[in-house]
Amino acid sequence: MRFKKKPTVVEIVEATHWDGTLSGVHAIHAAISGLNATSTINIAHTLRTRGLSSHPPSNTVSDWCIETPNGDCRVKTGDWIITFADGTNDVCRPDVFTDTYEPA
């Protein structure tokens, strides 16, 4: 037997591509926090950083880990941080993101 996977629509309120810099980490935190002011649903959007190794003079980050529903997840340069309508966040690799998501 063969099966076809049904398409689903997922409500993503923010998807941000991380550039590997400390200022990029701050920008993503600010974007997600800013959702609270513009959101039409009563959900607190927060991004919880669980670990961060930065090198301030060069603005680089060698290690970043965030909290997701499936536990802590390491973020790599080029990954997408996805914030869903229920307020949870997840990390998505760039190739998986482009293969999985498209504007609805």
Image: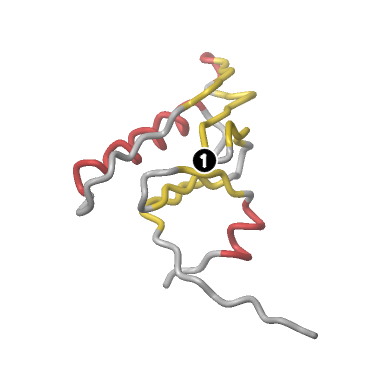
**At label 1, which amino acid type do we have?**
Pro
Q: In the rendered image, which quarter contains the C terminus?
A: bottom left
- Residue 40 lies left or right of residue 63; in this view the side is left
- Residue 102 lies left or right of residue 61; in this view the side is left
Instruction: Give the residue pinned by disc 1.
Output: 69
- Residue 79 lies left or right of residue 104; in this view the side is right
From the viewer's perspective, is residue 11 above or below residue 28?
below
Q: In the rendered image, which quarter contains the N terminus?
A: bottom right
Q: Which element is circle 1 on? A: loop
- Residue at the front extreme? 1
> Whole-percent x and y of residue 17?
51, 46
> Whole-percent x and y of residue 37?
19, 42
> Whole-percent x and y of residue 22?
49, 26
- Residue at the bottom extreme? 1
Q: Residue at x 44, y 29 (%)?
A: 48
Please state which of residues 62 and 72 is positioned toward the viewer in this rendering.
72
From the viewer's perspective, is residue 101 above or below residue 59?
below
From the viewer's perspective, is residue 58 above or below residue 78?
above
> Whole-percent x and y of residue 27?
39, 34
Please state which of residues 16 and 10 is positioned toward the viewer in this rendering.
10
Q: Residue at x 58, y 27 (%)?
A: 64
Counting other residues with Cα less than 10 Å from the Cα at mark 1, is it few (<14), some (14-19), or many (20 or more)? few
From the viewer's perspective, is residue 52 above or below residue 103?
above
Q: Based on the displayed image, in which of its 4 quarters is residue 32 positioned?
A: top left
Please state which of residues 85 and 32 is positioned toward the viewer in this rendering.
85
